[in-house]
Amino acid sequence: MTTELTMLAWSTGLLLLLVLIQATAGVLAQGPTVMAGSRDNVPAPKVFQARALRTVDNHREGLTLFAPLILIAALAHISNSWTVLGAQLFFWSRVAHAALYLVGVPIVRPLVWTVGLVGTFMVLLAVLGVI
């Protein structure tokens, strides 16, 4: 398996971990009965629960941009230093971003998010044959 596909697999694993954290935060904040119910009238999320929800949503959005590009690169047999570095930048920045988001660190978090976006752009440019 290529490095790019490995980074995609790990990025998907990160999403799974974040979903588990978010679900646990919901149960701890609202109680298991509320979270196991229909959730029609769930109270507003507590601070950490809301942050975990936003972390999951943010990672899911990044993954929807990153994953197709990695799959296109794999199908087109495009793997070079740009795609490898781009995939690694995406994954490791997403790990750091998630940790910073969950802990509530301001200012630095968007900068780390930008690194992941740069990695995604690197893969896009490689797939398009620009670099």
Image (tube, helix red, strand yellow):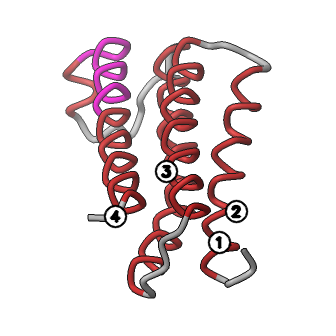
Q: Residue furthest bottom?
A: 76
| Label 3 crowd (10 A; few <14 / some 14-19 / many >=20) | some
Q: Residue furthest right?
A: 107
Residue, disc 3? 60
Asked whether 57 or 3 is in front, the reply is 3
Element marked by disc 2: helix
Mark 2 and mark 4: Cα distance apart in space: 19 Å
Q: Are discs 2 and 1 less than 8 Å apart at CB?
A: yes
Residues drawn in magenta? 20-31
> Which mark is in front, 1 or 4?
4
Element marked by disc 3: helix
Element marked by disc 4: loop
Element marked by disc 1: helix
Name the side, left or right, on which 124 lies relative to 63. Answer: right
Q: Amino acid at mark 2?
A: Phe
Mark 1 and mark 4: Cα distance apart in space: 17 Å
Q: Earlier in the sequence, mark 2 or mark 4?
A: 4
**Residue 127 appears in which quarter of the rendering?**
bottom right
- 30 within the magenta span: yes
Residue 85 pos. (x, y %): 57, 52
Q: Earlier in the sequence, mark 3 or mark 4?
A: 4
Mark 2 and mark 1: Cα distance apart in space: 5 Å
Q: Earlier in the sequence, mark 2 or mark 3?
A: 3
**Which residue is rendered at x = 46% and y = 65% of the image?**
67
Residue, disc 4? 2
Quarter of the figure that contains the N terminus: bottom left
Q: Earlier in the sequence, mark 1 or mark 3?
A: 3
Name the side, left or right, on which 11 lies relative to 9. Answer: right
Asked whether 34 or 98 is in front, the reply is 98
Q: Are discs 2 and 4 less than 8 Å apart at CB?
A: no
